[in-house]
Amino acid sequence: MPQIEARFRVDWPGFTLALDERFPARGVTALFGHSGSGKTTLLRCIAGLERAAQGYLSVDGEVWQDAKTWVPTHRRPIGYVFQEASLFPHLTVLGNLRYGQRRSQPKGRAKEQGPETGQATFSLEQAIELLGIGHLLARRPAALSGGERQRVGMARALAVDPRMLLMDEPLAALDLKRKQEILPYLERLHDELDIPVIYVSHSPDEVARLADHILVMDAGRVLASGPLNETLSRLDLPIRLGEDAGVVLDGRVAERDARWHLLRVACCGASLWTRDTGAEIGAHVRLRILARDVSLTREPSHESSIQNTLPAKVLSLGDDSHPALRLVKLEVSGSTVLARVTRRSAELLGLEPEQSVYAQIKAVALL
Ligand SMILES: Nc1ncnc2c1ncn2[C@@H]1O[C@H](COP(=O)(O)OP(=O)(O)OP(=O)(O)O)[C@@H](O)[C@H]1O
């Protein structure tokens, strides 16, 4: 799989960024961490906006920075989306998009981006269509809502036909309603774009909905990195999206039960019933299953109110945030799920690795 290899050290008074990471040059990689953990600094190093004294960066085998090489920002085939899109007020939306395109066409770029990269070129029209801004092209930025402005900012980043998209908290400046409006467009980018996206966020919801891979940052270091679900289900590190331990799984809407207002989602080789959110049959969805909503039994229970009971295998047990509790890592048809049980229940059930159990999943959230 194509990789991004990044080694940077940046020293500032009171802050050091130090990392040595490889992550996939495909899908969405979230840089996740508290404010001040160094996410933006890392993104700026990747963009070439910050020049780490010691640095190495290669993207799919192409070196952008090492002891001898420095590809300046304007020669890097990237699209950058900031927290707030700074659009030219005197230009229309279309004018802003075209201006961005012209700025990003340094001589020889077409060659750099040649067919050997295997990437289809991305046209302005496609960017406009993908972000749903066709009806806004003649407007000036002052006549756009914050959410529309951000969509134009994203289209502008895509219109330069980048080989990588860097997004720095693109929803942070928007209120909840606008965020909800834009997230579906980001999901479309995720589903339809062939290029890697590096997405800075400290929002658990955004990460759960969008990320394939995650780099968890803390005080300038990478605390953990890996595929999203693998990282969330690590028992040695309390990596949480939000307050509670849990996993995020991909699924597809398989059936609607109109009578009971339920959806059946095919996920991890099994079926899970959840509340009907109006999602279409066949739609790709993400499911969040919190450890506290999963309980374990030795035998399948036919008289439980819980609809979702799946055969599972115990992989390992770990400590939880309170000494009375344990986290149990389970395999459910090839996917990993976490369950939280009391230490006493773990003992009574005699839980141990390799054991077959049944996971009763009380609640599944469609993201
Ligand atoms: N140019 C600079 N010179 C000195 N210190 C800086 C510089 N830029 C950022 N910092 C410091 O580096 C640290 C990391 O900042 P950074 O913006 O990368 O964090 P972040 O994780 O993106 O935070 P946030 O989520 O708040 O945007 C902070 O302590 C910040 O004050």
Image (cartoon, helix red, strand yellow):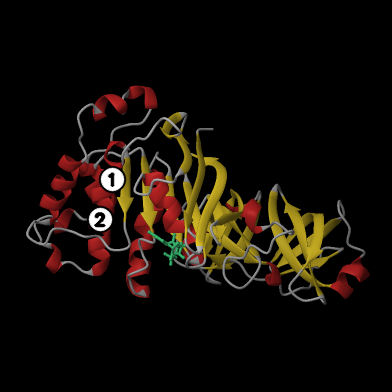
Q: Which of 305 and 355 is in front in this view?
A: 355
Q: Residues within 10 Å of mark 1 (few under 14, many from 20)?
A: many
As shown in the figure, which amino acid type bears the numbered disc 2? Gly
Quadrant assignment for the N terminus: top right
Ligand 1: give its quadrant. bottom left
Task: Determine whether 2 is above or below 284 in the image.
Answer: above
The spot of residue 78 in percent (x, y) is 33, 42
Residue 352 as seen in the image, left or right of residue 149: right
Above or below, comparing residue 127 to residue 260 in the picture: above
Residue 238 appears in which quarter of the rendering? Answer: bottom right
Q: Name the residue under label 1.
A: 158
Q: Quadrant of residue 224?
A: bottom right
Where is residue 127? Give x, y as percent. 25, 46
Residue type pointed to by label 1: Leu
Q: Residues within 10 Å of mark 2 (few under 14, many from 20)?
A: many
Along the horizontal axis of the image, is 340 left or right of 349?
Answer: left
Which numbered circle lies on residue 153?
2
Tell me the residue at 17%/42% (across/down): 103
x 13%, y 68%: residue: 143
Q: Do we see residue 240 in this rendering? A: yes
Q: Nearer the viewer, residue 29 or 124?
A: 29
